[in-house]
Image (spheres, rainbow, N blue to C red):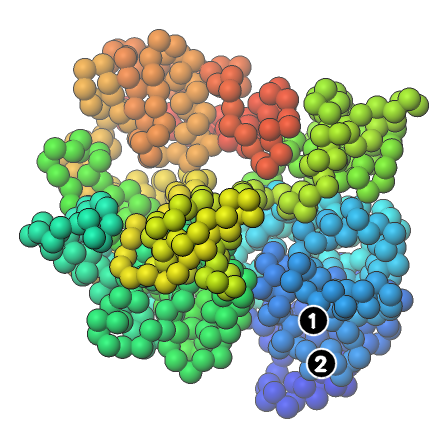
Amino acid sequence: MSVFEKLAPFIQNYIYYQGWESLKEIQVAACDVIFNSDSNLLIATPTASGKTEAAFLPIITELYNKPPDSVGLLYIAPLKALINDQFIRIEELLQEAHIPVTKWHADASQSKKQKLLKDSIGGVLQITPESLEAMLMTRKQNIVTLFSDLRFIVIDEVHNFLGQDRGIQLSCIMERIQTLTGNIPRRVGLSATIGNLSVAEDWLCAGTNKKCITPKVGAERRRARIMLDHFYTLPEAQGTNKEIEKTEKTKKIEESWLAYYESIYNLVKGKKSIVFANSRKEVERNIVNLKELAEKKRERDVFFVHHGSISASNREYAEEQMKNADLPIVTGATVTLELGIDLGDLDRIVQTGCPHSVSGLAQRLGRSGRRSGISEMSFVFNEEIPTENNDWYKNINWQLVKCIALIELYRENWLEPTNIEKYPFSMLFHQTMSFLFSNGEASPGFLAQTILNLSVFHHISQEDYKELLRFMLENGHIERTATGGLLIGHRGEQLTNHYSFFAVFETPIEYSVRDKSHKIGTLSDPMPPDTTFVLAGKTWTVTELDMAHKVIYVKSAKGKPPTVWHGSGFDFEHTKVLQKMKSIIASNTTYPYLTNSAKMRLEEIRTIIRQMGILDTKFFSLAPNTYGFFPWLGTKGQNALCFALTAILAESSIENDRWPMIIAKNVTHKKLLNALELLSTKTITINDLAIPEELPIMGKFGEYIPQNLLRKQFIDKYIDITEIQHFSKQLPI
């Protein structure tokens, strides 16, 4: 019997009426795994390769042929928007199979949730990890009924969980549900951007005692059309529109920025597009300027904003317009539109500045070209005109060089490998509290056996766990009963009795921004009356600040005031990216996707580097007893190198904040040379590193972890000693 013949009759009819000439190779392969094995399945193929159908056509068939006695399929996604969107394409099939679908998140129907709890026979449950955590903690009595005969767990955008606290949380939740039900469902992961398949397979299989099959199919990613442009702009004048006097200088400033925004406007004009930026601040600035240009040109305003501080209703409206409107809608976005929400056929992606990673570039590029078969992405850079007064290294646009490196690595089919933490103590704290909240009193031995048996914690020793539990006792997060058991303490109750505990990512205090009854979005800072700011691509003036209820009331205003958002976050760099940057600077290669201005800027950078001779020397002088050098190492390697040099040059200052350069101060030429030569001959251990006593808090619950364990976690996550040897071997002789 062929794969097609094994599919349910109504699915065969669906395929016929959809006009499919045949199933795609990945769909055939996925059906083979689902129908003919008990293995987990990882579908890792490019965007628009048919992953959704590959997973769900055979699963729907299995649930139709043998209906389960509980929820049959648990679909887990990183975003509520994906949950709202994902089943639209196959809703008809689910109705035909009489398989009900229930969405379970904060905005979902309460009546449908109650119906599921009352009658959990069959069906699909769509949920986020946070809602699943809440269910496990507050509805433990329903877990067995809901999932006793669960057959499949489908995890969408699985790469979004790998190496992240949310992934650790999700892995723990799935294993804890298995323990409660005695049932081990098969897991299916979907992703278009996984850099290390074996890591993803191991994560997917953790705690299941099943192997994972990743079909190797010839699914090719789309052809890509890429362009990178560069603009010089003048520093923006500070102050409000009313305060800034129109002088010749301000006119020149406006002209320099106008050319930049005009280029973005022309790129998206008549194209259904996303304009990505790495920060909310830049997204808002981009869209408010594009809106102003549209108004000046007397052209239609087709611009929307989509990021985490925009209200759910406004985000959903933007998604709906992108998907269904006949107009060439343009939406400015951060990572919120990077994942696979169906927005219809997008013509072009624009990125202002450099993406964080090759994986991010691939995700964003893959959003376009479904109809044409050619993905289009334009990168647009702006920077202040370099001045002779600046130190030479401040006149190098490293982000431009990094972007070219990311593009070249993408063309080489390379993606960043996933780093899996060995010592996620913040998550160990979280899961300990979650378990005690759900189960009540537990003996220390039973607690340790239960929690440390979770796959993600298998590197953590009992001694380390004892140290954490003692610290939790001292701080009142847990307390000991008269019989020696452990349960939630007073401070622990305060922490767990709040919905924010369910999420393991940071949830800062937010102020709701409202225009009368309409919620526009949120801000992290209170804005006093008469303050003017930009949100959702529009200008607002504060009419009232209600601190007690954390509400900022506003009315529509004019002008382009400064944006109010904070920085864009931290990039975790891989050494492969830095090495590619070095090779780009060292070569004379011309890249066809660079515009003339971008080519000129790259040549300016190459000229500066060659004139300074930094590729041919171990280090170079910046000032008396101050030297710089470029190790061309990723984050973990550069940290290790800095801590090693700090240990050797105890009286000197090693600064690591002028990426990708390291600066050594208060050191002689001879001492620095001796230190670098020592590193090239000595086998370095952790004990040879001068790691700071005060370490950054890692994870949302890192503040509740003792310093000794934080140090262990920091070393594992942010230091790689082997990279020092890699650096030493590449030092010029």
Q: Which residue is label 2 attached to?
A: 93
Is 481 left or right of 417, judged from the image as shown?
right
The image quarter in which residue 639 lies: top left
* Residue found at x 68% / y 52%: 129
Q: Residues within 10 Å of mark 1 (few under 14, many from 20)?
A: many
Task: Tell me the tag on residue 216.
Answer: none
Q: Nearer the viewer, residue 162 or 437?
A: 437
Residue at 36% of width from left, 73% of height from top? 302
Q: Given the current orientation, which residue lies at the most extreme right position?
A: 483
The residue type indicated by label 1 comes to Phe
The residue that label 1 is drawn on is 56
Mark 2, secondary structure of its residue: helix
Name the residue at 84% across, 60% down. Answer: 146
Q: Work out whether 458 lies above or below 130.
A: above
The picture quadrant where one finds residue 169 is: top right
Tell me residue 583's x, y (percent).
30, 43
Label pair 1/2, CB-CB below 8 angstroms: yes
Please report the residue visible at 45 percent of the width from the left and 80 percent of the height from the top.
325
Mark 1, mark 2: which one is toward the viewer? 2
Q: Where residue 355 sits in the image (x, y, percent)?
A: 39, 52
Of labels 1 and 2, earlier in sequence is 1
Spot occupied by residue 534 in the image (x, y as percentages of width and height): 36, 56
In the rendered structure, the answer to whether residue 638 lies left or right of residue 449 reads left
